Image (tube, grey):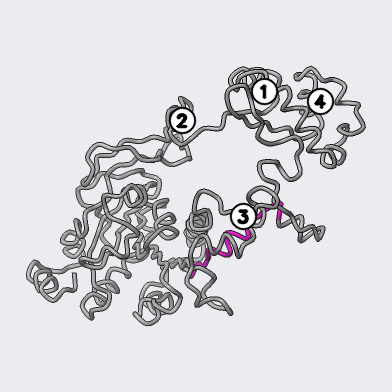
Amino acid sequence: MAQQEGGGAKPQSQGAEPVASSALKGIRVLDLTRVRSGPTCVRQFADWGADVIKIEAPEDSAQLGGPRSGADFQNLHRNKRSLTLNLKSESGIEVFRKLAKTADVIVENFRPGVKKRLGIDYETLSADNPRLIYASISGFGQDGPLADRPGFDQIAQGMGGLMSITGKPGEGPMRVGIPIADLCAGLFAAQGIMIALLERQHSGKGQWIQTSLLQAQVFMLDFQAARYLMDGDVPKQAGNNHPTSIPTGVFKTKDGHMNIGVAGQAIWKRFAVMMGRDGWIEDARYATAPARSENRDALNAEIEELTVTRTTAEWIDAMNEAGVPAGEINDIGQVFENPQVHHLGLVMPVNSHERGESHLVGQPILMSRTPSHIAHPPPTAGQHSNDILKDLGYSDADIAAMKAQGAT
């Protein structure tokens, strides 16, 4: 976006901080978020070079979701600037409304009624900045019968059906190992903002974007949702087995476990030949996908009788050479020792204020002209307050007075 695409007349200085990318140069984002879903959204803009100003309450660490030195905070808040502002004070709200006139985007994940009570909702702020794009992330939506419920990732995983299809049959519901509802809600909000920024080039107008943990989780059911909506099929837990592509799952080897992914008849035939079991191709129990589904346990047992005779590395080499998808099952340490992970730039260095030389996960998108970097670590609280307030026209005396009043 060119600089003139910004929200209103404003300075676009990012102070002395290096810029993470040139891709979103000239876009200013005000970050009112906390914990995970909102920061996940805003990180996408910080990492691609937008001027992200994190609004933090003075001396309030409760909003952070953990200490500033913690790995979680360091991961979520890099490439931002920090302004401390007390939004419960009249002076703090006045500063924020003035800053909002300069913004392209505001992102918040308060409970639905909070922004209205503070007078910083979309209707209020867009009256002074009609180009403003305002994104709200909540647990269950901005309105409706469950809108006032507090949102939490595991609650959304359960209500959104994910836990009913995760885990082994008969062992009860199981959450997945990452906060997937939080993360997906944040990423969908970022996608919505980017759509709105593109649309604004034609209309000249901003808009209010809403998503929630529940919406994100239901959407991420994907083909499992389609099985119900199209066919009335309520999917069940399948453990490590793929619910429809068989045989796909985890198999024991001589020295551990591996994943095998056999999807479609062509791969099935290659797999049978590669395993030295050409007879499986014509075996009535396994010849078709429906037959393999019906006889899944018997087929898996026959496969595992073979896989335990060789090491994981031997099988993976043989299967990939034969065009059969297969892979290691790594722990997190092994993931980040993987040479392909390093080759793709997923491990990036950062010099943290709190932790010194460290590494964080980089963006999973490669751009030929405007790549993303971790240009600077998460800011200290209020690190950029004076610069931002001076850009808004406040004098040193004004700033000192506001600090004395606890407004910033």
Q: Nearer the viewer, residue 94 or 216?
A: 216
Label 4–label 2 contact, CB within 8 A: no
Q: Which mark is residue 220?
A: 3
Q: Residue at x 82, y 41 (%)?
A: 293
- Secondary structure found at label 1: loop
x, y percent for residue 67: 28, 55
Q: Left or right: where does residue 380 sit relative to residue 276?
A: left
Nearer the viewer's eye, disc 1 or disc 3?
Answer: 1
Q: Residue placed farthest to the left in the image?
A: 397
Label 1–label 4 contact, CB within 8 A: no
Q: Mark 2 sits on what residue?
A: 334
Alpha carbon of mark 1 to alpha carbon of mark 4: how far? Answer: 21 Å
x, y percent for residue 272: 79, 23
Segment tinted magenta in the rendering: 208-224
Alpha carbon of mark 1 to alpha carbon of mark 2: how far? Answer: 22 Å
Q: Mark 1 sits on what residue?
A: 308
Alpha carbon of mark 4 to alpha carbon of mark 2: how far? Answer: 32 Å
How many residues crowd around disc 3 within 10 Å: few (fewer than 14), some, or many (20 or more)?
A: some
Query: Of the residues shown, which amino acid type is indicated by label 3?
Result: Met
Placement of the C terminus among the 4 image quadrants: bottom left
Query: Of the residues shown, which amino acid type is indicated by label 4?
Result: Lys
Q: Nearer the viewer, residue 240 or 402?
A: 240
Alpha carbon of mark 1 to alpha carbon of mark 3: how far? Answer: 35 Å
Sequence-earlier tag: 1 or 4: 4
Q: Mark 4 sits on what residue?
A: 269
Sequence-earlier tag: 4 or 2: 4
Sequence-earlier tag: 3 or 2: 3
x, y percent for residue 216: 57, 60
